[in-house]
Amino acid sequence: MFMLSSRLAVAGVILLTVCFSAAAANATSIITFVSDRGTDSGNCEEIHPCRSFQFAADQTSPFGEVKALDPANYGAVTITKSISITGVEGASISPSAKPNAITIDAGPNDQINLTNLTLDGMSGKAQRGIFINSSSRLRVIHCVVRNFKFDGIKFQNGITARFLIADTVVSDNLTGINAEGTGTLDNVSMNKNSGVGLVVDGNVTSVESEANGNGSDGFFIIDGSLKLVHSTATGNGCGINIFGGKTLSVGNNFINGNSITDVCPLGTKLSEVETQ
């Protein structure tokens, strides 16, 4: 009996040790860190940072944060949960092989925050800067999104996301922002894209934002509504192209100096844009 009890006790200790080790191996942290000097191993602590956003995000708890400690290219990342990724000046994602710099495939109640990041498509080597493939909540603050083959920021067709994009530059892509769902652009520059600055297929409010110098339209409304507040469209082919839906103006917008016409279809007058 004594020998049997002893063996059971030893087996129990071994089982507990295995379980504890497995739990420790799968442990995540509320805050993780990346650095140019880091390596993708461990839990991405500040004293032992990791090298890539993807590895660090995988070690981060839901509703946690990945922080960049210094300037570097931290590689493409796919986000599947509530998380914040916070950069510093010079912290970038410049994928040369991945289709998107950031892919968001999180749940409908998840919140994703992206701050102080430069996303660069390397002169069209990558397809999109931010690709939103789920009805999550998204905040993009103080970022630069440029040089992508297709869209700077793209919401997948049929996605009803909620978003805020603020203090951000989206330039030198094919399309600047292709927006579905409901959201606000606050001090966003959608300039010098070879196609359209902003495509609207939802309900979008543009505050103190600009779509200037784009090859086609500044603002292109497919469906839903675009509300313009102190916004600008100049130097495009067409300033506002109302293909469907409606455009609402609260005044103090500057829609002028576009090479084809300020408001499309041809013959539409700026005074015919609805005001509130």
Image (cartoon, helix red, strand yellow):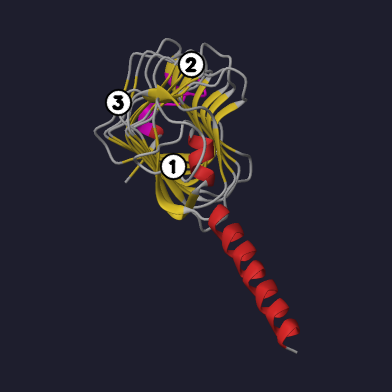
Q: Please, is residue 4 above or below residue 77 in the view?
A: below
Which dot, 1 or 2, sits closer to the camera? Answer: 1
Q: Residue under circle 3? A: 89
Between the C-alphas of marks 2 and 3, the distance is 18 Å
Residue at the spot x=53%, y=51% of the render?
81
Q: Who is closer to the viewer here, 107 or 85?
A: 85
Going from N to C along the chain, the mark reached first, 1 or 2, is 1
Between the C-alphas of marks 1 and 2, the distance is 30 Å
Q: Secondary structure at mark 2?
A: loop
Q: Residue under circle 2? A: 147
User: Contact, CB < 8 Å: mark 1 with mark 2?
Assistant: no
Coordinates of residue 156 in the picture (x, y in percent): 61, 39
Q: Who is closer to the viewer here, 196 or 259?
A: 196
Q: Residue under circle 1? A: 44
Coordinates of residue 64 in the picture (x, y in percent): 42, 52
Instruction: Tell me which corner region of the image, top left, top right, bottom left or bottom right, holds residue 68.
Output: top left
Q: Which residues are magenta?
A: 262-271
Q: Residue 268 colored magenta?
A: yes
Which dot, 3 or 1, sits closer to the camera? Answer: 1
- Badge 2: residue crowd in 10 Å (few <14, some 14–19, many ≥20): many
- Badge 1: residue crowd in 10 Å (few <14, some 14–19, many ≥20): many
